[in-house]
Image (cartoon, rainbow, N blue to C red):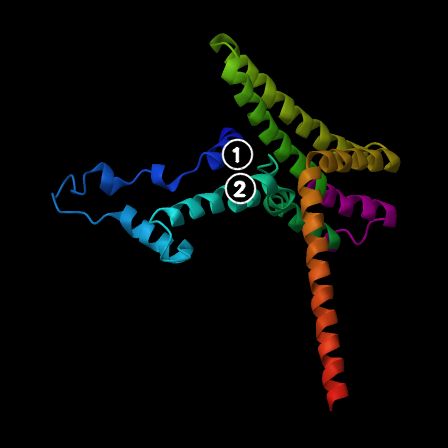
Amino acid sequence: MRNLRDLPRQFADFSVRQSNCFCCDAQHVHPVTGEVLSCDRQMVYSTLKEWFGSSATCSTLDHLDQFDMQVRASLVNLVVHQADGEVWAYRNALFVGTAFLWEFVARVFAAFSLDTLIYVRYVCEPLVFFFAACPSCMALTFLSVNWEERFLEWGQCSRRRWASCFIFVLVYLVWFVGSVGLLLSRMVLGVWVQVATSAVLMLLTLVLFRASLRRQGQQGVNTGCLLMGQGKSRAFEATRSVQAT
């Protein structure tokens, strides 16, 4: 989490000239064998010159400046802005929680003899864990780590242990309440309590992953627009070819 918070500053101050290089630090001599080492920095510089050197009139360092600008402008937009301060994206949480889908499949084929309403409540429970309970717990865990790191940056040493314990107990208390609430609402309480508990967990998931869901939705819209544009262009080309014949 701390590394994620430092990314904007690191990208803003990035300079390929200030990067560390083992061969240069070792004075181009292997510290054990004593063999002469070729300079990796010069090889990287020459490669960047082939990629970013636009003309022979430019100075020898212009391509390095162009590479620095490319990293600070394009790469920072790809990594920092798309991350939006979020380490744990919703799709990653779904991937980790796929075990609940196996539970869903097992219940679908193992509970045919139950009453219809009981069957639906019993079968849909793993889906709530998959789409809401498990991702929410993971997101809260990452948030707790972030809060803990921020607290440890200014908190006194005597308070750090208590802060860590309190934050993690709070997170797993939320997980315990959510999971036990789902089980009790199905086994003891009525159907509306189970629906309300599931709705609360889904709402919590939407709040925690709102940035990730918004970004994925925008990517889906952009992909759809691109496919529609390609389809229109192909249809136009097909129409022109038919008219030409």
Residue 8 numbered tag: 1
Part of the protein shown in magenta = 109-130
Residue 209 picture location, percent across and down? 68, 38
- Asked whether the residues under the numbered discs 2 and 1 touch, taking CB atoms below 8 Å apart as contact, a structural biologist would say yes
| Mark 1 crowdedness (10 Å alpha carbons): few <14, some 14-19, many ≥20 | some
Look at 68% across and 58% down and name the residue there: 223
> Residue 125, labelled with which disc?
none
Identify the residue at image location x=67%, y=51%. 219
In the rendered image, the residue lying farthest to the left is: 34
Specify the amino acid type for callout 1.
Answer: Pro
Please tell me which residue lies in front, 42 or 40: 42
Seen in the image, is 140 located left or right of residue 56? right
Could you say where residue 22 lies in the image, as x and y percent from the top left?
26, 40
Magenta residues: mostly which secondary structure? helix
Q: Is residue 144 left or right of residue 112?
A: left
Amino acid bearing label 2: Val
Q: Which residue is pictured at 55% across the width and 13% down the height?
A: 162
**Of 61 and 145, which appears nearest the observer?**
61
> Residue at label 2?
76
Q: Percent from the top left, x then y, of residue 142?
A: 58, 31
Q: Does label 2 or label 1 sit earlier along the sequence? A: 1
